[in-house]
Image (cartoon, rainbow, N blue to C red):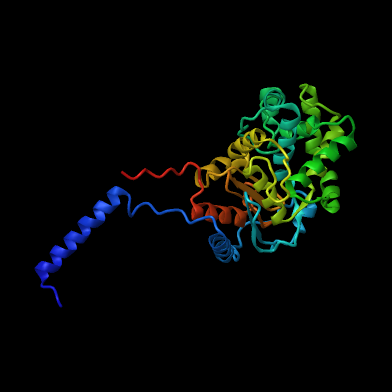
Amino acid sequence: MMLIPTKRRALQCMLAALVCILLMTGAVAQTKAPALNKENIEKALNEAYTKFKDVSEGKNADYIPELAKVDSKIFGIALVTTDGKIYSTGDLDSKVSIQSISKVFTLARIIEELGSEAIKDKIGVDATGMRFNSIVAVELQKGKEINPFVNPGAIAATSLIKGKTYEEKWNDILTTHSDFAARQLDVNEPVYQSEAATNQRNQAIAQLLLAYDRMYFDPKQSTDIYTKQCAINVNAKDLAVMASTLANGGVNPVSKKKVVTAQTAAHVMAVMATAGLYDDSGQWLYDIGLPGKSGVGGGIIAVAPGKFGIAVISPPLDAAGNSVKARKVIEYVSNYFQVNPYLAMPKEK
């Protein structure tokens, strides 16, 4: 039956009014986040992989010669829920060096060993606002407030690790990373040797920290341990398990081993939120909202506390040193499941 123009207009007005009411009450504007189940997780990861697999932006880090040789086509995504379920797509076989993501887990260990107040006193937790390898913050603050996620603070953190010898400290670091990953990790020797041959700036940073009494072990050995730490080999699944351990309050959801306390995990994630993505940490938090950490090897991890850890490996980096594809994927998945902790929907009346 055809409506005469007057009745059609009346019906259109009624429908428009109904939509306005629904929008005002939130019935249309609010959409419930998809359930975090197998079907939806696999759908989200596959969609993200397909959407971003042909992105050609960015380039491999080349200031460490061996990193320039890494296959730029590596692209793997993994997500591990806090009940230990593992989901993945893409390349999970290829390994890259963990690089600055290692700073997360070394920080977790020294908080466990020394306490949260000691970290604030001996290193600092405020973002420096400087480049990751800058000495300006060290000079301005006389070695204080240097943050464990930039190189000066990370080298100081390594020097704080429990142990009286190089070997004891290194074993503690490697064991910690392996416990977070739920498997025994090893070192990418070519990357380690390449970094060790080109880390003169980090050696100089360690000596400068020593001048300000902010180095807590031999500066040369501390720098070498830090260099080896950054060369630990991981794949996307390893990183996702490590991130999910933080999401699960310090208990590895795969191995069920308590690696750190829930309070330590909370402290670590706070620093990840404020200083985890180099110069783009503010932009990351603004766009995604999740605690995250990147490394110039091409990996990024992010944590949805109480829900999951996600990791992506793709070596080409943007100007700030963060993987282009990894950032896009994590933003896509975060939005898909609406896990940004700052995204608070109004309650329905």
Q: Nearer the viewer, residue 32 or 53?
A: 32
Residue drawn 60% across and 65% down?
A: 53
* Picture quadrant of residue 107: top right
* Picture quadrant of residue 101: top right
Query: Looking at the figure, which quarter contains the C terminus?
Result: top left
Residue drawn 26% across and 56% down?
A: 19
The percent coordinates of residue 170 (x first, y second) are 85, 39
Residue at the extreme bottom: 1
The percent coordinates of residue 115 (x first, y second) are 71, 27
Query: Looking at the figure, which quarter contains the N terminus?
Result: bottom left
The percent coordinates of residue 62 (x first, y second) are 74, 52
Residue 224 in view (yes/no) = no
Residue drawn 58% across and 63% down?
A: 42
Residue drawn 37% across and 43% down?
A: 346
Q: Nearer the viewer, residue 137 or 146?
A: 146
Residue 9 in view (yes/no) = yes
Q: Nearer the viewer, residue 249 or 3?
A: 249
Q: Nearer the viewer, residue 24 or 48?
A: 24
Q: Is residue 6 left or right of residue 132?
A: left
Above/below status of 100 relative to 62: above
